[in-house]
Image (spheres, grey):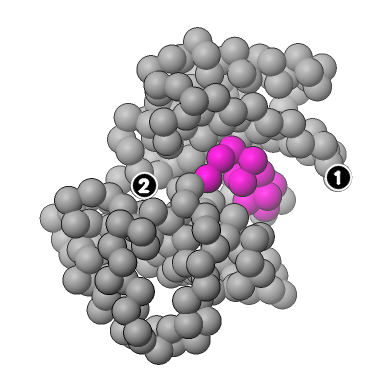
Amino acid sequence: MSIRILALNTTMDSCSVALLNNTHISIRFKIMSCSHKRSVLALIQDLLYEQKIKLSCLDLIAYNRGPGSFNGIRFGFCIAQGLAFGANLPMTGISSLLIIAQKAWCQTGITQILVAIDARIGEIYWAEYRRDDKTGKWLGIETESLISLEIALKRIATLYGRWAIAGSAWQAYPSLLIPSNVQFLNSNVLNSVAEDMLSLASDSWQNNNITQVDYADLTYLHKDIEWKKLPGR
C-alpha cells in the first residue's frame, strides 16, 4: 500500500523531521532553538524537494502531542497544524512517552517498557506499556501520568517480571532502580526523534486513527493530582 507521511518532533533543544515515502525514509535533524520557525520549514522543504513530493501529495502529518516541554510541544504542533491546514491533510498526534517506548522496544525486543521522563522539581512523566506481539498494539496508554518520585516507587512495587526502561528520569532519580520484583533492562533510550514516530503514524493511518486539523490537540498533564490520567481515559 502506498503511503506518504511527514513526521515532526520539536520536543527537545532540537528539531527533527522525517518523511516516509512508501518504504523509503528520509530524515533531517538540527540542534536549534524552538523559536526558529524558518529553520524548521526549511528542513521540511528540503525533505520534500529531495523526494520530489509536493506537500499536498502527502497522506498524513504526524506530530508529537506531548507531554513534555510546553514551548517545544506547542511549537511543533503549530507548525504541523499550519501545514495540514494549508494542504488540507489529516493529522495524527502521538504521545511523546509512547514514541520513546516504541524506540526502546525496537532496540531491546522487550515487550514491557517503563518510560520515565524527568519533568523537573521532583516529578516524572510516567507510563507503563505492554506490547501485544500478535496485534502490534501498545497497551497502557491510560497509565500516562505526571507523578511524584514517591508515587513512581509505589508503581514499581506493584510490577514484576522483565521491563525495559527508557527516558531521562532513571538517571535523574537513581532510587527508581532499587531492588524490587522487576528485572530492569536499560534500553539507553533517553529521547526520541521524528524517525521514531513513523511506524506509529503508519499504524494510525492504517487503523484510521487520524483527525482533521480542527480537532487536533495536545496532551497536558498537570501536577495538582498525584496520579493524573489523560482526559477522557
Q: CA distance from mark 1 to mark 2?
A: 32 Å
In the image, residue 125 sits, relative to residue 32, either above or below, namely below
Q: Residues within 10 Å of mark 1 (few under 14, many from 20)?
A: few
Q: Which residue is mark 1?
A: 1
Identify the residue shown where x is 50% and y is 86%.
161
> In the depicted view, which residue is nearer to us: 60 or 23?
23
Q: What's drawn in magenta, residue-wise? A: 192-204
Q: Quadrant of the N terminus?
A: top right
Going from N to C along the chain, the mark reached first, 1 or 2, is 1
Secondary structure of the residue carrying numbered label 1: loop
Looking at numbered disc 2 in the image, what kind of residue is underneath it?
Pro
Query: What residue is at 40 percent from the left and 89 percent from the top?
Result: 181
On the rendered structure, is 107 left or right of 9?
Answer: right
Q: Is residue 185 above or below residue 45?
A: below
Q: Could you tell me which quadrant the C terminus lies in?
A: bottom left
Q: Estimate the x, y position of residue 154 in percent, counting from the top left.
A: 25, 79
Residue 55: x %, y % from top left: 69, 19
Where residue 132 sits: x, y (%)? 63, 74
The answer to whether residue 78 of the structure is visible from this angle is no
Graded by Cα atoms within 10 Å as few (under 14), some (14 to 19) or many (20 or more), the crowding at tag 2 reads many
Query: Mark 2 highlights which residue?
Result: 67
Q: Residue at x 52, y 14 (%)?
A: 39
Residue 162 vertical position relative to residue 117 in the rendered view, above or below: below
Give coordinates of residue 44: x percent, y percent. Answer: 63, 20
* Residue at point 17%, 51% (across, down): 121
